[in-house]
Image (spheres, rainbow, N blue to C red):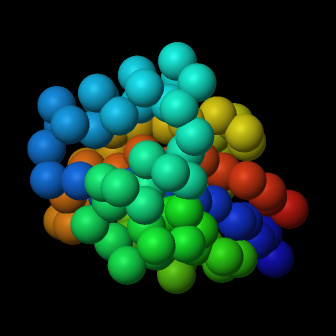
Amino acid sequence: MAKASARHILVDSEEVCKDLKSKIEAGADFAKVAAEHSKCPSGKQGGELGEFKPGQMVAEFDKVVFSAECGKVHGPIKTDFGYHLIEITNRTE
């Protein structure tokens, strides 16, 4: 069964999400940005979510994690929790 590891940053607005993505793409450290800005408790661990399988995260999140390119920052992705930036760190089929 497929498994993935990812880290994410959760914020309240699409605008903030886009701004943080621009900073990361310009060289800011994902983990530091997560620690400073993420509303999710995982922010304290640099946004690390550990390893999970399809269906363990909300559908919008799963769709990105199990189909998009690894090692890139994806988003903003809107869920009921807010707006996410997601970096897929590993995936096995």
- Quadrant where the C terminus sits is bottom right
Q: Quadrant of residue 45?
A: bottom right
User: Is residue 78 left or right of 72 when viewed as pictured?
Assistant: left
x then y, percent, for residue 75: 40, 37
x then y, percent, for residue 54: 61, 73
Residue that lies at the very extreme toward the right in this rendered image: 92
Residue at image coords 76%, 71%: 3
Residue at image coords 55%, 45%: 30
- Quadrant where the N terminus sits is bottom right
User: Is residue 75 left or right of 1 when viewed as pictured?
Assistant: left
x then y, percent, for residue 33: 43, 47
Q: Residue 64: tell me if it is visible.
A: no
On screen, residue 82 above or below 75: below
Q: Quadrant of residue 10?
A: bottom left
x then y, percent, for residue 27: 58, 24
User: Is residue 65 left or right of 90 when viewed as pictured?
Assistant: left
Residue at image coords 40%, 22%: 22
Residue at image coords 35%, 55%: 36
* 29 or 90, nearer to the observer: 29
* 24 or 60, nearer to the observer: 24
* 30 or 68, nearer to the observer: 30
User: Is residue 31 left or right of 66 when viewed as pictured?
Assistant: left
On screen, residue 52 above or below 19: below
